[in-house]
Image (spheres, grey):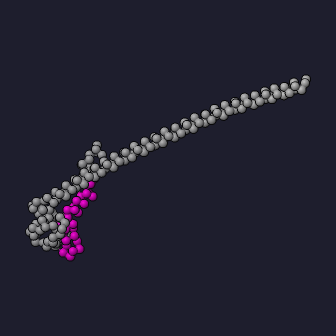
């Protein structure tokens, strides 16, 4: 075997080895590309899932916010209606005629657990109180305030105070009347 043949065998062997290495590298490259494609698909799926989860969370949050706003608006409307009812009650107090004012003063004086020596009230009550021969002092609030002889006891029957007391005492009852169970 001559030098040329040895050289040719070595070149052929080197070529084969080179072809094998290139083929292995090509296979490795293909495997890496497939793995990368699978990993990219997995990442895309995870990102899509995260986006969908975030989208659902945002939708739930928006729905929750919308429900909360609707509830607040409903509560606000109910509060306005309650305020209207108590304002109407206050207006009815202010619209008492003379006979009703007299009955009002009689009831509050008789219902008081001390001897009334002075009544403070708005001008429209002055004539009513004069009949009782009790000292009267004009104040700028509608209604009356009953005062004992020594001034240590007093009962406030001004209209604002009456409405305030009724509001705190009967708010629930008025709400149940205005908004029956089915409407709440």
> Residue 6 falls in which quadrant of the image?
top right
Residue 169, how many percent across, how many down?
26, 57
Please tell me how many numbered marks the rendered image carries: 0
Observer-nearest of 82 and 38:
38
The x, y position of residue 34, in whole percent, is 63, 32
Residue furthest out toward the right: 1
Q: Is residue 38 above or below residue 149?
A: above
- Is 156 colored magenta in this rendering? yes
Which region is colored magenta?
144-173
- Say which residue appears at 14% left-offset and 62% top-offset: 104
Based on the displayed image, in which of its 4 quarters is residue 17 positioned?
A: top right
Q: Nearer the viewer, residue 127 or 139?
A: 139
User: Where in the figure is residue 92, as x and y percent of width and height?
Assistant: 16, 57
User: In the picture provided, is 30 more to the left or to the right than 101?
Assistant: right
Task: Verify whether residue 61 appears in magenta.
Answer: no
Residue occupying the far front of the picture: 4
Residue at (23% x, 74% y) in the render: 152
Residue 184 in view (yes/no)? yes
| Quarter occupied by residue 23 | top right
Q: Name the residue at 16% across, 68% down.
A: 121
Q: Is residue 112 visible?
A: no
Residue at horizontal 77%, vertical 30%?
Answer: 18
């Amino acid at each position: 075997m001559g030098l040329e043949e040895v050289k040719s065998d070595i070149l052929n062997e080197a070529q084969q080895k080179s072809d094998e290495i290139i083929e292995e590298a090509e296979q490795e490259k293909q495997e890496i590309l497939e793995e990368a494609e699978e990993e990219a698909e997995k990442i895309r799926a995870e990102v899509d899932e995260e986006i969908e989860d975030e989208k659902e969370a945002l939708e739930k949050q928006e729905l929750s916010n919308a429900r909360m706003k609707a509830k607040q608006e409903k509560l606000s409307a109910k509060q306005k209606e309650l305020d209207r009812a108590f304002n109407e009650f206050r207006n009815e107090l202010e619209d008492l005629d003379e006979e009703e004012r007299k009955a009002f003063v009689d009831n509050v004086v008789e219902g008081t657990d001390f001897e009334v020596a002075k009544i403070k009230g708005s001008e429209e009550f002055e004539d009513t109180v004069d009949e009782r021969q009790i000292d009267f002092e004009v104040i700028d609030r509608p209604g009356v305030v009953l005062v004992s002889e020594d001034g240590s006891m007093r009962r406030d029957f001004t209209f604002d105070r009456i409405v305030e007391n009724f509001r705190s005492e009967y708010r629930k009852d008025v709400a149940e009347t205005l908004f029956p169970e089915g409407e709440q």
